[in-house]
Image (tube, helix red, strand yellow):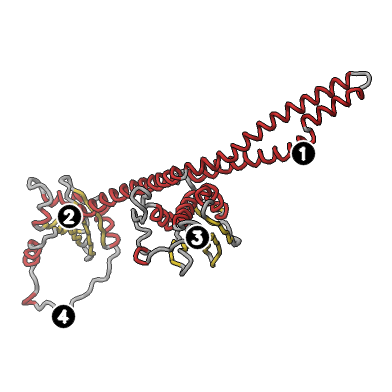
Amino acid sequence: MATAPTPQPSDDAFPPERAPRFADLMALGELMDDGYLLCRGDGRPMHANASARALVPEQGDALAALVALLPPEAIRVAREEGRWNGDLTLADGLVLQVRAYCHDTGDGGYCLIVFHDVSEAHARQQELQRRHAQLRQTLVRLAGAQEQLVQSEKMASIGQLAAGVAHEINNPIGYVHSNLGSLQEYLHSLFSLIEVYERALRLPDPKVMLPEIQEMRDRYDIDFITGDLPQLMSESREGIERVTAIVRNLKDFSYSGRDDSWKSTDLHAGLDSTINIIWNELKYKVTLEKHYAKLPLVQCRPSELNQVFMNILLNASHAIDERGTITVSTGVEGDEVWIDVQDSGHGIPDEILQKIFDPFFTTKPVGSGTGLGLSISYGIVKKHNGRIEARNIPGAGACFRITLPIRQPTTDAA
């Protein structure tokens, strides 16, 4: 049996007249809050104090009952290694921390088992775990509510822009419809001319119909039709492609963030897509300037960033009263990219500059804004491990800068 070296007392530690008697030691043991059981090395019980005896039923052999509480390996491991420890849960819910110590004296040795009540600490631990689980559930619910809030704000923004988007779609559809009317007239004229050509080909001498053919060509202005048809088809195709692009941009923009995954994305494509959606809101009073640098693909959730771009661009537009300029610039600094949106509006008063990202804070009239656009944008950029900052440009309105890491930390982009 392996045991740790036992410190030896000095010669005068216990003078003969003052050496502690076994009865004195037992009396001290009775004062202990912790229970203890003294056994021989083979596990036969010798003595237990009152605190230990209180752990087992009063009827029967208390010492044997205390030994029975121990796992079979407790004394064996203590004999081999000098000590053993573990936890016991009794039938009444009492939780005990048990430690067994063995010392070999050459005649089988002795074991001391100490029972320490940790029920309160265990209960506190259980309560902490329960509250931790509740907090995790609350966090999950809050995350879900936040996603719903972001999606609701996104759809509300699209709703506010619905008239402008409808105009952007109706415009190309209008001239495509008009072109189809012209195309129908052109086809009628061309089919009529083809019919005359067919009649001429069935005659022995087709040349006799040349005057009628020329008269019909002049009447239907065939030369104009052959020149106008390619342009008409090109305009119609351009209009359909414009509508397709707007619908695709709307679909990408309204995509639920819950299903939006991290991907390497061209931020310029996202900016242009967002500008296409809100262009009807901008074009009547804004001159848009783009100063795009060469950017690497950025790991992000593109649908969420498009919402940030829209909120910032619309705020810039609202800061311009009549006519003005919005400048969108991009660049790279180290392992980050930045996007600047600068307007030539009236700027942001210094006293509210620190409040603009607070939830529900708005300077717009009641009913004209939720006050959530910039707050949600701040949260999205923070989730991307980035920063969003606003500053005034003396004499040139305000500038919002969005800074994003090119690559997300592994734990965040999982």
Q: Amino acid at mark 1?
A: Gly
The numbered mark, 2 or 4, whose residue comes first in the sequence reads: 4
Pick whichever, 357 or 62, lies toward us: 357
The residue labelled by disc 1 is: 227
Which disc is residue 120 wearing? 2
Which disc is residue 341 wearing? 3
Of badges 1 and 2, nearer the viewer stands 1
The numbered mark, 1 or 4, whose residue comes first in the sequence reads: 4
Q: Secondary structure at mark 4?
A: loop
Left or right of residue 231, residue 355 in this image = left
174 vs 387: above or below: above
Of badges 3 and 4, nearer the viewer stands 3
Which disc is residue 11 wearing? 4
Q: Amino acid at mark 2?
A: Glu
Of badges 2 and 4, nearer the viewer stands 2
Q: Secondary structure at mark 3?
A: strand
In the rendering, at what x and y percent does residue 263 appear? 53, 51
The numbered mark, 3 or 2, whose residue comes first in the sequence reads: 2
Mark 1 touches mark 3? (CB < 8 Å): no
Q: Quadrant of the N terminus?
A: bottom left
Q: Amino acid at mark 4?
A: Asp
Is residue 203 something that shows in the picture?
yes
Distance from disc 3 to disc 2, alpha carbons, whole Å, reads 59 Å
In the rendering, at what x and y percent does residue 189 appear? 75, 27
Distance from disc 2 to disc 4, alpha carbons, whole Å, reads 44 Å
Number of numbered tags placed on the structure image: 4
Q: Residue at x 81, y 30 (%)?
A: 217
